[in-house]
Amino acid sequence: MSKRVVVSGYYGFGNFGDEAILSLLVNKLKKNGFEIVVLSSNPRKTSIDYFVNAISSFDFYQVTGLIKQSDILISGGGSLLQDVTSLKSLVYYLWVISTALRYRKKVVIFAQGIGPINNRFARFITAKILKNCSYISVRDSKSFELLKSWGIACNLLCDPIFSVPVENKHLKGTIGVQLRNFHTMNDNLLYKLARQIVKDFFDKKIRIFSFQDSIDLNVCERFQNIITSLNPSIKTELVCGLSNADVVKNISELEYMIAMRFHALVVAVKAGIKSVALNYDVKVEKLASEAGLPIISMDASEDFDLVFDNLKHLNEHKLSEFAELHKFDWSGFDEVLVG
C-alpha cells in the first residue's frame, strides 16, 4: 500500500515560483509511488493542474483529519515561516506542522527560506516546533545560520527551481520586466526605470510580467502606462495568467531581463539571459551578488546609466555556468521518505 503524503505551502494563489516548486515536488513524489494530497487555496484548480487530490488549506477540520490519516507532511518550499508578510500566515503554517507532529507523522521542511521572524514569541514557538521535524532543508545560508543558532540541524540546498529545464535560446529584440507589488514599491523607481528603458531600448519590445495577478497586475499595468506615456511608439506587452511552462518559455525568449522576484531571476540566469535584479528582498540581493548581476535598490539611488551598461556587458555563458553549478540535491529528501 502506497504512503500518503500531504503537501502544505503557498499553493493555489497563482504565484509562479510556488506553483513551479509544487510541480517539481509532485513529479518527484509520483515517481516514487506516493499518494499525494495538496493543501490549496484553490483545490479544484490545483487538482486539475497537477492531477492530484487537493483540499482547501483553510478547512481546518478536514485538514486535521487528512493529516491524521496520512504518513508524511511536506511543508514548503518558499518562504513560509516568516512574519514579514503576516504573522497570521506564520501561525497557520506552524499549526499545520504541529498538527502532523501531534499525530506522530514524519514532517519534512522542504527547501524553505526561514525568517525573518520579528515576533520574539513566534521565534520561540517556531524553533520549538522545528526541533521535532524529521528532515529540514533550507535554500539559503541566512536560513541555515538562523537554524544553526537555534541548535537545529538542517541541510543547505539551492532553490528547487534550479532544477527546472530551461532552453538557452539567446534571442534578440525583447526586454523582460518583472514587477511585483510590495510595500517598498514607489513611483520614483518606476519612472526612473521606465526612462532608462525608453532611452536604451526604444527599438525593442518590452514584455512586462505579472507572476501573481492578484498582487502584481496593478503595478505592471501602471508601469506599462508609464512606458507608453514616455514613448507612445514603443512596443509593450503585458504578460499574465500563464502556466508554469509558458512563463519559463517566455523568459527564455528574452534578450535582457529586469526582475524583482527571485524565481524570475533564477529562470533568466538558467537561460543565460543578462539580467538586472530589483532588490526588494535579501534573497534577491544574495542571488544577484553570487551570479554577478547588477542591482537596483528600491530607492533607485544607483546611476542607472552605469547599471544598464553593466547589464549589457554581462557574459551569457558565465550566467549559464553559474546556474549549472546549482544542482538540487534530493538525496536527504529521498532517504527520509523511504525510511
Image (tube, rainbow, N blue to C red):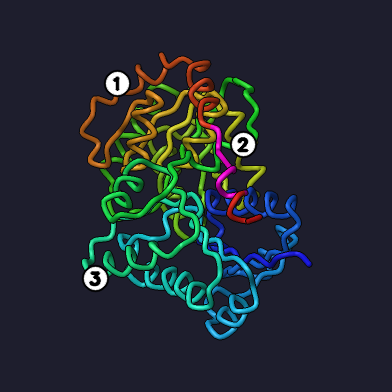
What residue is disc 1 on? 305
Check the image and report above or below for 119 versus 159: below
* Residue for point 52% across, 20% down: 321
Q: Earlier in the sequence, mark 3 or mark 2?
A: 3
Nearer to us of marks 3 and 1 is 3
Q: The residue under label 1 is which amino acid type?
A: Asp
* Residue for point 47% across, 30% down: 257
**Residue 144, can we see it?**
yes
Q: Nearer the viewer, residue 214 or 71?
A: 71
Residue 273 located left or right of residue 89: right
Q: Residue 224: which numbered mark, if any?
A: none
Q: CA distance from mark 3 to mark 1?
A: 46 Å
**Residue 203, can we see it?**
no
Q: The residue under label 3 is which amino acid type?
A: Phe
Quarter of the figure with the C terminus = bottom right
Name the spot of residue 246 as percent of width and height, x first. 66, 42
Q: Residue furthest front?
A: 339
Which element is circle 1 on?
helix
Name the spot of residue 79 as percent of width and height, x first. 42, 54
Q: Nearer the viewer, residue 332 or 285?
A: 332
- The image quadrant that residue 69 belongs to is bottom right
Q: The residue under label 2 is which amino acid type?
A: Asn
Nearer to us of marks 3 and 2 is 3
Q: CA distance from mark 1 to mark 2?
A: 26 Å
Which segment is the magenta one?
327-334
What residue is disc 2 on? 250
What residue is disc 3 on? 121
Name the spot of residue 270 as percent of width and height, x first. 55, 29
